[in-house]
Amino acid sequence: MGTRRSTLRLLGTALCLFGAACSTAAPVTPTSAPAAAPTSVAAKPTSPPPAPTAAGAAKPTSPAPGPTAAPGAATSAPAAAQAPVSAADEKAWEQQTYEAAKKEGKITVYGFWNPDLEKVTREFLAEKYPGVELETLTTTTATDKIRTERQTGQFLVDAYLGGGTTALGLSDLGFTEKFTPPAELMQGSKWKVPPSSYMSFPSLVYAIQGKGILINTQLVPPDKEPKKWEDLLDPFWKDKKIVMDHPGRGGGPGGSWARWIYDQPAPLGEAYLRALAAQNPVLDAGSAAPDIDATARGEYAAYIPAYPSSIPQVPDAPVKFIWPERTGGGTPTLVAMMKDAPHPNAAKLYLNMQVLPEYQQKISEVLWISPNLLGVTPPDPLVSLDGRNVQVDTEAETKRNNQWANTTGKDIFGQ
């Protein structure tokens, strides 16, 4: 809860999924840049390319199952796709924007950071864009913090990093603006979901997170290792053996996970959540990293909802990530550019960096995050979503998360 400077933990996670923003769960054709001749990128680095048409222009009136992952499948292109960008044009834009960003000196990003993600990002920036420093703030209440800053005339942050619920809240306040980075439009690029148009509100999806269970193998005997979510209702797991992100707070993985469980048929659904609450888990509304560390130290037997990226966060610890038989839904992990950013060119360079092939490969290898770009080889089979039938939250489901957490989530799990 609250905020913490720089060295902080994130939840970056690995997953891979596919589907249009408001479609039903069915694999479709990969998103790729259209075959039209390349066009040059805008000359001024402060002017973004024309905004893309959002995928699924019509807003759904009721939540539908999110798109499901299938090996080699991805989403179809937006209805009115932008022209592709050649590698040469992308490099020219990148160089021009970098020169402008160097004069600004830094990029300030609020959100769900952890030390590993921050280290990878800082090192990548230093190597590729020397002179552009990274300033971070870890916060689970980014919307409130940025609102307070802007109400007092302080424009301090350039971008937000985290989940769709907070990005939606920032958009509703008019704090973010749409930006389609040239790297997204490079010829031949194929995406699991369209990065800048999967959601209609300003956002750029760089990875997709599928949810599972992290256990401490020294505390959980093999015969008690959960194979499905229902196994956590065994008496073995009663009384503070599980630590979980509080489902009654918006903006965190616990709320979106519990909302997904709530929407599922029996033996999941509301009855399952109430039975889980009766197990007396420890509920935390802070960042995931301390709970992952506590599980690794043996303070808890399990942490939920977890991601494969938990494993490299606690190297050599006696922990194991488990994909349940029915995975716990999938969440797009994204960044969003702030309107009136104090360092606008650095912000655009940062967003473009997120979807560069070399950065997508780096976060997969080092962080065990499943990137949005198709064709990136995962560092371990555990990271791959192939065959796991993960459902990615649609925009309609993302819009439900906060309201569900603040009403049903609090009713089931308490304040």
Image (spheres, rainbow, N blue to C red):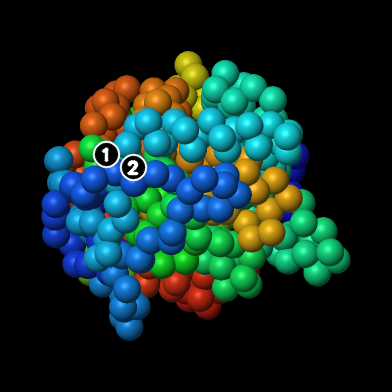
**What residue is at 38 percent from the left and 61 percent from the top?**
52
10 Å neighbourhood of mark 2: few (<14), some, or many (≥20)?
many
Give percent across and percent down for residue 128: 55, 22
Q: Is residue 122 above or below residue 260?
A: above
Q: Is residue 191 left or right of residue 351?
A: left
Q: Can residue 270 be seen in this view?
A: no
**Labelled disc at residue 187:** 1
- Give the labeled residue for mark 2: 85
**What residue is at 40 percent from the left and 26 percent from the top?**
358
Give percent across and percent down for residue 402: 52, 70
Q: Is residue 151 visible?
A: yes
- State how far apart marks 2 and 1 are (Cα): 6 Å
Q: Is residue 271 above or below residue 306?
A: below
| View extreme (right): residue | 152
Q: Are the residues at dot 2 and dot 1 in contact (C-beta closer than 8 Å)?
A: yes
Label tally: 2
Tell me the kind of residue under disc 2. Val
Give percent across and percent down for residue 411: 52, 75
